[in-house]
Image (cartoon, rainbow, N blue to C red):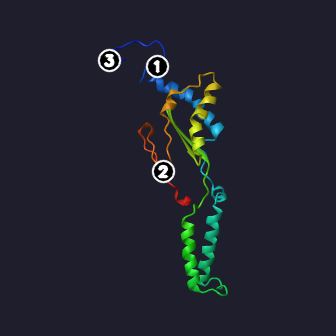
Amino acid sequence: MEAGNFSPSYSGTPQGGIASPILANIVLHELDIWLEEQYKVNPLPQTPAERNARSNPEYMRLHYRIMDIQRYLDGKRPMPRNTNPEELRRELQEKRRLRSLQPRLLPRKVTYYCRYADDFLVILCDASKKEVTRRPSTLCHPFAGSRGQSPHYPKLSGTCLSHHHRPVHPLDFHHRSADPPYDR
């Protein structure tokens, strides 16, 4: 139907028809698999050992110094020579302030992917702006080219680039970043 007039269609599937999302899921399932192989999208959560491997060295240096000072002040360790408790309390306060400015973990470079019918959302964590602006074409061009399809994607004109602290609204769902409690 165009401008209120019905005109028969001889190719494709009708907009809103039941076959359209089914056919899209069949074809785009290959995109799902390709993204998992090429970009390792949607990785499993990190184990505690993997998370600890991303510890920020500066944060940990401050953290261990804070623990040492607390042991001195609690009497669990003998007080170092030429120091008094008041100096240690001031140093403890300053080290806690500096530690609060440091991230606990170094950023994790990871890609998340979510698809519903022919719409999809790709989230790149810890990617540069150059990588993000180049990614839409690199995501689909090799996939289409290897299957003999034309590499133009009108849907990519709706690509939305956003910072992770600003919410995005694909498919009328509201996505926003939330720092996990262990990353603080």
The single residue placed furthest to the left in the displayed view is 4
Label 2 or label 3, whichever lies nearer to me, is 2
Q: Which residue corresponds to the image point at 49% horizontal and 26% vertical from the top-left? A: 22
- In primary-sequence order, the first of circles 2 and 3 is 3
Q: Quadrant of the N terminus?
A: top left
Residue 92 visible from this viewpoint: yes
Q: Position of residue 5 (x, y in %)?
A: 33, 14
Q: Position of residue 175 (x, y in %)?
A: 46, 45
Of 79 and 137, nearer the camera is 137
Question: Which three-letter amino acid code belongs to the residue tagged 3?
Answer: Gly
Q: Quadrant of the C terminus?
A: bottom right
Of 18 and 11, nearer the camera is 11
For label 3, the crowd category at 10 Å Cα-Cα, with few meaning under 14, some 14 to 19 and many 20 or more, is few
Question: Which three-letter amino acid code belongs to the residue tagged 1?
Answer: Thr
The residue identified by callout 2 is 165
- In primary-sequence order, the first of circles 1 and 3 is 3
In the picture, measured across the screen, residue 13 lies left or right of residue 83, that is left
For label 1, the crowd category at 10 Å Cα-Cα, with few meaning under 14, some 14 to 19 and many 20 or more, is few
Label 1 or label 3, whichever lies nearer to me, is 3
Q: Do residues under tags 1 and 2 come within 8 Å of each other at their CB atoms?
A: no
What is the secondary structure assignment of the residue under circle 3?
loop
Label 1 or label 2, whichever lies nearer to me, is 2
- In primary-sequence order, the first of circles 1 and 2 is 1
Question: CA gap, disc 1 to disc 3?
Answer: 19 Å
The residue identified by callout 1 is 13
Is 178 rendered above or below residue 66?
A: above
Q: Position of residue 160 (x, y in %)?
A: 49, 38
The residue identified by callout 3 is 4
What is the secondary structure assignment of the residue under circle 1?
loop
Question: CA gap, disc 1 to disc 2?
Answer: 38 Å
Is 155 rendered above or below residue 113?
A: above
